[in-house]
Amino acid sequence: MKKQDVQLIQRILDGDQKAFTAIVEKYQKGIHTLAWQKTGDFHIAQEITQDTFLKAYQQLGTLKNRKLFCGWLYVIATNLCNDWLRKKRLPIQSLETVDIKEVDQVAYTNYIEEQTEEDANESRRELVGNLLKKLPESERTVMSLHYLGEMSCESIGEFLGVSQNTVKSRLSRARNRLKKEESMLRENLSSFQLPTQFTENIMDKIMNSKPITPSVTKPLIPLAISAATAIVAALLIGVGAQNIFRYQQPYNIDRDSEATIEIIDAKLVIDTPIKPTLSQQNGNSIVADKHDSIGHSFNNSPVSASQIDETTVAPSKGKWIRAKGPHGGQIVGIFTSSQREVYVGTIHDLYRLSEDTNGWNLISSNVPFSGYWKLIEYNDKLYTVSNKHVYTSMDKGKTWNSLCVRPDGELIAFTITDEGFYLAISTGVFHSKNSGSTWIPLNEGLEEKEIKTLIAVDNHLFVGTDSGLFRLSSNKWEQVPVGKNIENIQALAYADQKLYVATGKNKRNQLISDFMAMMSTAKSNISLYRSTNLGDSWTNITPPKELMKKPRTTKSTFPNSSGIEPLPSIELVTYQNCLIMHAVSDSYFSNDGGENWSILDRSFTNVDSSPVTAILNENTIYCGGNEGVFRSTDSGNRWQEVSTGIVNKSIMDLLVSNDILYAYIENGLVISTDGGDTWHPLAGDISVIKGIIESNGDVYIKSSRDLAPQLYLVSNESNRVLPVPGIPKLEVPDFNELMSEKVSNALLGNLEEEAKNNLQQEKKFNPEQFNSENFNESYNKIITESMNESLAYLIGSFAVQDATFYMELKNQILRWKQGENEWYNTGLIDENAIDASEYVSDFRELDKFKISVLENTVYVGMKNGHLMQSLDEGETWTDVTSNLPFDVETFKTIVLAGETFYVATDKGAIRSIDGKNWETLTDENGIPLVMNRLAVADTTVYGESEQIIYKVNRNNDRWKQVTPKIEYPVSCIDTDGKTLYVGTFGSGLLRFILDE
């Protein structure tokens, strides 16, 4: 389906307007169904459907990844529906109000007949609409698209940006809810037929519209991609929740249809340029490009860590102040210049190693090409490529200027030689002789090949593809044999007159493939070759199989089912005669050009894919991880963290209590007593932290060990984290053991008897006796089931009122009072099974419930959109959803300010004292604001909406903006009434001084 869309779009962009007819016929029913569901008006939905296709046609040139046309169309339709709802467009005038005398009698008779039929259809539509209103919005959407839009589960998944399994799950739940009425729904489908001339009417508008202009930009990736597989897998194997917040943010259908997240895996690791050549290698990583426009100059004066300290000590009102700590953060690239200066890049900033080599100086803050990027050097200038442009710096990275627009496509590599710029995307190579003013395709010989890597060596250009290695000769690509067979080229590198080529097969489950290669007679999937004559002959220098079978230096991860292409399974880093090969699970080091190898430990980096690496000299190696920069001065035997001066931690949770800041970062819980400038770890035996709250001046923490939830109390006397005294232990199944047993059974079940006997006797077996396809299917099913089961124990919010504790566990609310011997089940339960594939973002979004307590009153916002109230500490529950001023699909948080409960939802924020009377909080124009997070100071409530902080108090019902927009993605907020504190994803802590 995606391939067909891409082909049609290309024809349209080439000037074939008629090709758009196929697009309209394919999607018009789904778009109309969506519009009808959102507006409730069958005819208005037709207008919106026509407008959707017209707008899509006019803006088709701005679509950067044509494979995502379906989801893009969905966003356009949703935005048009929201526009119509906001404007409260007047209903179309009925013909019944027109003077009959002005209408020809024959036409009037025809009209009456048509109107009678239309009235009957409208009644049937109203019946269907009432049936569907019984469902939550997510289930209502898939039900409508399936029955009314006549779309398959696969098509709906692409349309909504969710997995096919998620669609099936929602459809199944919806059918169960409407068991008795499903036949009635089927009987009334005929009332949803579109007019016979509907497609023709749309195409008439298209033909009369302005021609589209193709856009020279880069393809995108859908935002609604589930990261739950990686989340739960990481937690199951002990990586911890500290890694969770690196996953992409959820798709927001209320954003403009042009808003996207760009894909550019431009890792910063490169070698010293070879003579006058320069390269940039890229894979697939998620970034958000900022301020990316031609002609803009970004001036960021170099500032050292000490200078930052001096300039940010004094309080400053009216602007956000970036705290000086905690040090460290996710490193996305490392670069060594020709003068052997070492640079590191974070998602937002660029640093250079200080002269004493003990810390880092900030060179450029909030760089315009944000995300995973890579620096390259040529003729004393630095270059990098973003999703749209090529940037250059002539002052060692202090200021950056947009040099040119680059060709559209998934960026693979960028290199510069005496002949000009060469840029590779996944589908081809482009050449520019005038610094990017014009680009010429250079693809003869590369037809129907996927580009994997590109490198320039003394004006010789090599490109690695899925069908072998090619060398440019007279503007044509000629294949260069490597090994015995045509190989899938994964990586290229060059140093000290040696060209290195790494080959490997693409595997859906790379870890299982590695295991099978180890246990069977099959060869490794990885091969490494070296040439000293630019590819005329090759020497196999693959690390010995015995070395590659040693214990892994990284933690195992489960296969990626999110739909995101994995990072390259092999990467090469070189300097003179030193060579590092990063494979999917391990890294190897050689200081003699690949003659001898040793394991390179990389477990400290806390990354599962290839870590960013640079070799400074034969002894010194720099490696970037998720928590900072590490250095080895003995060829990788021992490592030491050197992150001083880098302030790019992700703050996953934040609390201010009694002038102390508590923050949960990647490597644990830390505290600060000076507003976030200096931090110290909080002692205590805790691992994965699920939440931090305050009750009556005491700080409580929810953690988990082996998925078993535990509650802790911060001791003011010892400044340690201790278990809550007397709290009963909750028993949790050993999911690792259960999963291992299931995997072992699946493995044996897919082996022939001879191979099974050999394996049990610890002998090699023939890989042809193993059904890998069936095993992959079984393995992925086991992982999904294990994730869903374990999530029920892992996730969950909690609340504390005096000596009474409430906690979510296994889709239900438990209560424990000090002095009791066990947890009490309050009887409140969410019967819907957890579907890990539905969750895409912040760990707190996994919670089934949002809990808030005042004395005996408990409020619980449920995942199904219902708000429950208990006036007797959870003994009995009342559903107060019908009292709410609007329908709710998602509760974001519930907080207590004084005696008033504030509830943030996906439709806006509301408040109530008794649960019967609710007040909607709006902005100055009377429009409800959707608050992502709330924080309380006495009776004033602060909320974050679209990275702006607002406040409201008990004396008014209007949100008032109190801060400028925050430039970084927000993860959490809190306040002590004097200062606002904001935790970010990848940019540390921010603070804002409030007015007195």
Image (cartoon, helix red, strand yellow):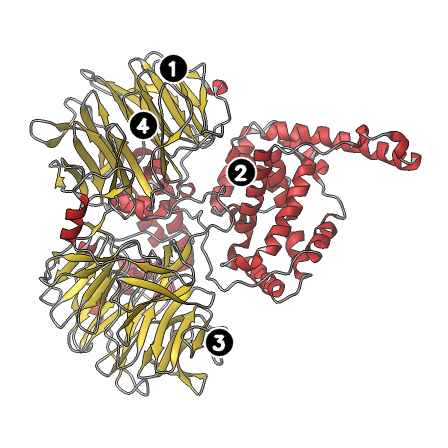
Q: Which residue is drawn at 33% across and 59% down?
A: 298
Secondary structure of the residue carrying tag 2 is helix
Q: Quadrant location of residue 365? A: bottom left
Mark 3 and mark 1: Cα distance apart in space: 67 Å
Q: Mark 2 points at which residue?
A: 171
- Mark 4 Cα-neighbour bin, 10 Å: few <14, some 14–19, many ≥20: many
Mark 3 and mark 2: Cα distance apart in space: 46 Å
What's the amino acid at mark 1?
Ile
Mark 3 and mark 4 residues within 8 Å of each other at the beta carbon = no
> In the rendered picture of this protein, how many numbered marks are placed on residues?
4
Q: Which of the two discs, 3 and 1, labels the residue nearer the N terminus?
A: 3
Q: Is residue 896 visible?
A: yes
Q: Give coordinates of residue 659: x percent, y percent.
A: 16, 30
Q: Give coordinates of residue 557: x percent, y percent.
A: 29, 52
Mark 2 and mark 1: Cα distance apart in space: 37 Å
Q: Which of the two discs, 3 and 2, labels the residue nearer the N terminus?
A: 2
Q: Name the residue under label 1.
A: 913
Q: Which of the two discs, 4 and 2, labels the residue nearer the N terminus?
A: 2
Q: Quadrant location of residue 400? A: bottom left
On screen, residue 718 versus residue 423, left or right, reads: left
Q: Give coordinates of residue 770: x percent, y percent.
A: 37, 61
Mark 2 and mark 1 residues within 8 Å of each other at the beta carbon = no
Mark 1 and mark 4: Cα distance apart in space: 24 Å
Mark 3 and mark 1 residues within 8 Å of each other at the beta carbon = no
Q: Which of the two discs, 1 and 4, labels the residue nearer the N terminus?
A: 4
Secondary structure of the residue carrying tag 3 is strand
Q: Quadrant of the N terminus?
A: bottom right
What's the amino acid at mark 4?
Glu
Q: Name the residue under label 4.
A: 808
